[in-house]
Image: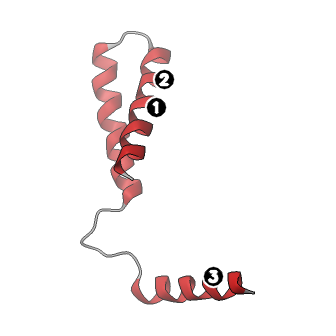
Amino acid sequence: MIFLGVFWSAFILDWLLGDPRWFYHPVCMIGALCKFFEKLLRKIIPSEKIAGVLAVLLILGVTISAC
């Protein structure tokens, strides 16, 4: 029962306030980080698989450390 109260409270607050327009959404920041690492690692590392694994590890490391 408490879960429903928390759910509806969060739903109504999100509906009323929404995401602030002045703040860059975290998902957009992660997308920009993906683009940055992809460009950088494609220049440095010839193997796409190794570059991909390294990109995933770097992106996860940055996003986890930012929390």
Foreground disc of the pair 3, 2: 3
Q: Are the residues tagged 3 and 2 within 8 Å (C-beta)?
A: no
Where disc 1 sits, the SS reads helix
Q: Are the residues tagged 2 and 1 within 8 Å (C-beta)?
A: yes
Query: Which residue matches tag 1?
Result: 56
Outermost residue on the front side: it is 2
Q: Position of residue 22 (x, y in %)?
A: 24, 72
Query: Which residue matches tag 3?
Result: 7
Amino acid found under the numbered disc labelled 3? Phe
Q: Quadrant of residue 11?
A: bottom right
Where disc 2 sits, the SS reads helix
Q: Are the residues tagged 1 and 3 within 8 Å (C-beta)?
A: no
| Residue sitting at x 45%, y 30% | 57
Marks 3 and 2, the one that precedes in the sequence: 3
Amino acid found under the numbered disc labelled 1? Val
Q: Position of residue 40 (x, y in %)?
A: 28, 25
Above/below status of 41 relative to 10: above
Above/below status of 2 relative to 54: below
Outermost residue on the top side: it is 46
Amino acid found under the numbered disc labelled 2? Val
Outermost residue on the right side: it is 1
Locate the N terminus by quadrant: bottom right
**Mark 2: few/some/many CA within 10 Å (<14, 14-19, 20+):** few
Taking the image as shown, residue 60 lies to the left or right of residue 2, namely left
| Residue sitting at x 34%, y 37% | 35
Q: CA distance from mark 3 to mark 2?
A: 37 Å
Which numbered disc covers residue 53?
A: 2
